[in-house]
């Protein structure tokens, strides 16, 4: 069983709308949790990295939250743009990276 | 600034043929280097990582091997490719454990 589960597997949203992606993990303890954005056919690019003690981290229109008690993280995209269409990957680092399978987001005009 | 290169970008190889994928990093010294494989619709799978020249750690048993002949060069190889080796191969670097990993553009390998 994967130690990092992401949901939904995919979603479609209209341009300008908000969306929230979920990441549940069983890795504990861990040093940091990361969110990456991966455009189709490209390498992942780091969006946020949060340590165990942080609750939220923003990068422009992307805001990641972390609840260490429930072992959940979310990535919120505000005012989505067509360029946000990509796969978003949650990664938990307990000195060995555990990758989620990703959520594929499609933004439509 | 730091950059990471991978080549080739795409590769089509017959079953049983050898493989050599190269990854180089510029603008940093003594990085930790990683090779990942990403199958369609699946998460990234760590294949190898290296903390220094000649130091290779393997995460999964397979017919692939890795080498680090120079500080900023990481090579993924195989003597005989299998159909199951098809996938998207990503190289990544970081300055140290716990730091952000930076990924290369990837190599798409199709074994026929």
Image (cartoon, coloured by chain):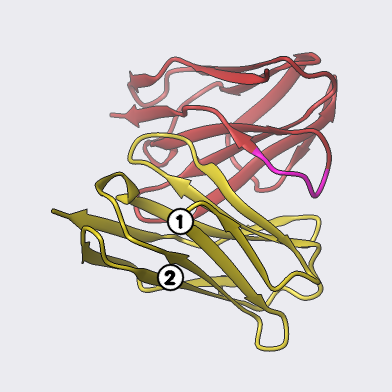
| Mark 2 touches mark 1? (CB < 8 Å) | no
Secondary structure beneath dot 2 equals strand
Which mark is drawn over residue A61?
Answer: 1
Q: Foreground residue, A67 or B34?
A: A67
Task: Choose the circle earlier in sequence order: 2 or 1.
Answer: 2
Using the rendered view, name the quadrant where residue B97 is placed. top right
Q: How many numbered marks have been drawn onto this rendered protein structure? A: 2
Q: Foreground residue, A33 or B19?
A: A33
Using the rendered view, name the quadrant where residue A9 is placed. bottom left
Q: Foreground residue, B38 or A42?
A: A42
Q: Position of residue B85 (x, y in %)?
A: 44, 37
Identify the residue shown where x is 33% and y is 60%: A79
Which chain does the red colour mark? B
Using the image, name the chain to which the residue with label 1 belongs: A
Q: Quadrant of the N terminus of chain B?
A: top right
- B7 lies left or right of A83: right
Image: magenta residue range: B97-101
Identify the residue shown where x is 83% and y is 18%: B29
Q: Foreground residue, A5 or A55?
A: A55
Which mark is drawn over residue A21?
Answer: 2
Colour in which the image shows chain A: yellow
Q: Which is the main secondary structure of the residues drawn in magenta?
A: loop
Q: Position of residue B12 (x, y in %)?
A: 32, 21
Secondary structure beneath dot 1 equals loop
Q: CA distance from mark 2 to mark 1?
A: 14 Å
């Amino acid at each position: 069983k994967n130690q990092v589960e992401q949901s939904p597997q995919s979603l479609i949203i209209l341009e300008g709308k908000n969306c929230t992606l979920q990441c549940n993990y069983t890795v504990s303890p861990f040093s940091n949790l990361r969110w990456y954005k991966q455009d189709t056919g490209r390498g992942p690019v780091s969006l946020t990295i949060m340590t165990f003690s942080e609750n939220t981290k923003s990068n422009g229109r992307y805001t990641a939250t972390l609840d260490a008690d429930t072992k959940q993280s979310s990535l919120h995209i505000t005012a989505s743009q067509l360029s946000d269409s990509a796969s978003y990957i949650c990664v938990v680092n307990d000195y060995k990276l555990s990758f989620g399978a990703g959520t594929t987001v499609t933004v439509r005009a | 600034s730091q950059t990471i290169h991978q080549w080739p970008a795409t590769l089509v190889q017959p079953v049983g043929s050898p493989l050599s994928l190269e990854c180089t990093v510029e603008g940093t010294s003594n990085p930790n280097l990683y090779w990942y494989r990403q199958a369609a619709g699946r998460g990234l799978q760590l294949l190898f990582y290296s903390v220094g020249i000649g130091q290779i750690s393997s995460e999964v048993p397979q017919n692939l091997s890795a080498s680090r002949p120079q500080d900023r060069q990481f090579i993924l190889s195989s003597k005989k490719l299998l159909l199951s080796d098809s996938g998207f191969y990503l190289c990544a670097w970081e300055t140290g454990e716990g730091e952000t990993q930076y990924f290369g553009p990837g190599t798409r390998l199709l074994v026929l």
